[in-house]
Amino acid sequence: MNLHLAAVALNQTPLDWPGNEARVRAALDEARAGGASLVCLPELCLTGYGCEDAFFAPATWQRAWRMLEDLLPATRGMVVAIGLPVFHQRALFNGCAVAADGELLGIAAKKNLAGDGIHYEPRWFKRWPDGVRDELRLDDGRSVPIGDLLFEVGGVKIGFEICEDAWVADRPGAKLAARGADVILNPSASHFAFGKAGIRRRFVTEGSRAFGAAYVYSNLLGNEAGRIIYDGQLLVAQNGHLVAESPRFGFADHRVLAVTVDLDAGRLAMARSANHRPQLPATADAGLVRGDFDWPEVAAAFHVALPCDTGDEGQCEEFTHAVTLGLFDYVRKSRSNGFVVSLSGGADSAAAACLVRLMFDAARAELGDGFGGKITAGDFAEVLLTAYQSTENSGPVTRNAARVLAEALGATHRELDVAAIHKAYVGMIGEAYGEELNWEEHDIPLQNIQARVRSPGIWMLANLRNALLLSTSNRSEAAVGYATMDGDTSGGLAPLSGIDKHFLREWLRWLETTGPVIGGERRTVPALAAVNVQQPTAELRPGEQGQTDEGDLMPYEVLDFIEGAAIRDRKSPREVLGLLKVAFGDRPEATLLQWTKRFFTLWSRNQWKRERYAPGFHLDDENLDPKTWCRWPILSGGFREELEQL
């Protein structure tokens, strides 16, 4: 038996009821037009995955249920899996409704909840126990089955692994195979992280082989709720082979991946397997939900491992496509009129400006000059305004680098002289303090005020344009608090906060000479040569002092190594020092000791700063954002005893 099925990616927004419903309808229309008779939508696609504590509001799950009822007529002629929260027995469950030809058959409930890293599903949902089935009472007095269900629709058995269900050791798919599942649907909300696409391919293809079923994987797409980016990867596999895969990323509202599979191939594979242990008698299976449906006849297909565009890219390419998609959705969903960047001429602000340009080019290449009506912009100068803000310690190198880069990108560029404002603050506070301020005794206050006097002007420019101000702090700086609160941290979004400085500098060199593929061709920014040639510096001390970031802290390569060992791997100061001696054995031991003490001291002292940073994007499994990944006490012992014993 051949079955034409489809996996769907959706770019949803939490609690956007009309918009979410319209996008579901559009995707179903496209799937129907393509001849698909079985359609898998993503996890929690009606509400949006990122509703946070709005899931606790009865209005949220009640409204989602009304949307489901409104959508049922749109499923006529198809079998459709639709993700939504379901309230049952005074508990909320992450469910997937199955509708066949306009009728609701039942709700499959998620068994394994994602509760690590950025995920907090156990805060809102309860896991459904294995092997349990119940009846969900509806408002009109009817009831539908809910729980650990296998659906038999028109002789085709359909089971579920909902997102995290496929990431655990004891996958539900094994029991579904014993119960005779022909198709396993995986509606997911799987966030982007470097290298994650390959992991998904492996469990989808291996699941199709081990479970003897066609395996269909759907996902969300875009920046749904602010911090998390979804790459929209869609996968279909059978008999251990990847049959089809969609491109990742993209600026469309939805994407449909349709393919024909031969269910008899999976049935034959299980019949041949000496280790297949069918559950008998099948008719006694209490979790089986039957529904009538006439599957349309589909022409036979040639089923072997088809060549698929896996979309494997280097980390620089992945970073570019993920962050540009994140920026595009953030600016349109926040209803902002573009971006503003305080362009210092250094690496971080240059990266932020370049990412906005790449976002503009990629969106226009896919959606056309009108951007599909998603954002309003005639040319790039309307999208990005940059400003170089000089004090008496600013030099011609950074001023020139900022101007050259802004011109090359096509941004609206301004130069603001804030030296007089800076000087007035220093004089005013010196008089109030009762002594003249000097660099020998008042180094940090004199540095910080320079960063802070730049904030009001750049905020005002952002307000005048109703634009989104981008802050430019990276993860390395966040780890040690090498940033001025209400200065260079000012902004509504921090697109670089998930990336370390060592990688960021590599990306800038790559962008200067190689660049990402956009619209079928490589895009480079040669003007970055003026930035990449510089040694990173805050440029807050007088020029004769030769201030550099790495001089103030330590080499960024070392800083990022310590951060990974101490925060990601939870190593103690003594263990970190031992690792440093191995990895950087060519450095003096006294220097390694100094760097270790500096990192742990600054890390503990600056948690309050990390709590106040603007929202950023989650890009890997080393995020320092205390709201989505790395929680740490604001007040602590600061490793004082551990550092004294080194």
Image (cartoon, rainbow, N blue to C red):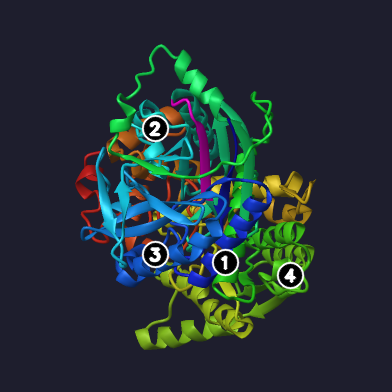
> What crowding class fits label 4: few (fewer than 14 Cα within 10 Å), some (14-19), or many (20 or more)?
many
Q: Which label belongs to residue 22?
A: 1
Name the residue tied to disc 4: 411
Q: Nearer the viewer, residue 545 or 471?
A: 471
Q: Main secondary structure of the magenta part?
A: strand
Q: Which label belongs to residue 460?
A: none
Amino acid bearing label 4 = Ala
Give the structural element (helix, strand or loop) at label 2.
helix
Give the structural element (helix, strand or loop) at label 3.
helix
The quarter of the image holding the N terminus is top right
Q: Nearer the viewer, residue 618 or 169?
A: 169
Q: Looking at the image, is mark 2 or mark 4 earlier in the sequence?
A: 2
Q: Looking at the image, is mark 2 or mark 3 earlier in the sequence?
A: 3
Name the residue tied to disc 2: 173
Gap in Å between the C-alphas at discs 1 and 4?
Answer: 35 Å
Residue 300, by quadrant, is top right
Q: Looking at the image, is mark 1 or mark 4 earlier in the sequence?
A: 1
Amino acid bearing label 3 = Trp
Q: Looking at the image, is mark 3 or mark 4 earlier in the sequence?
A: 3
Give the structural element (helix, strand or loop) at label 4.
loop
- Where is residue 49? Give x, y as percent: 43, 58
Q: Is residue 295 something one can see in this rendering? A: yes
Is residue 215 shown above or below 323?
A: above
Residue 286, by quadrant, is top left
Gap in Å between the C-alphas at discs 3 and 4?
Answer: 46 Å
Gap in Å between the C-alphas at discs 2 and 1?
Answer: 32 Å
Q: Nearer the viewer, residue 468 or 243?
A: 243
Q: Nearer the viewer, residue 73 or 614?
A: 73
Which residue is at a point 21% across and 54% down the rendered structure image? 637
Give the structural element (helix, strand or loop) at label 1.
helix
Gap in Å between the C-alphas at discs 2 and 3?
Answer: 27 Å
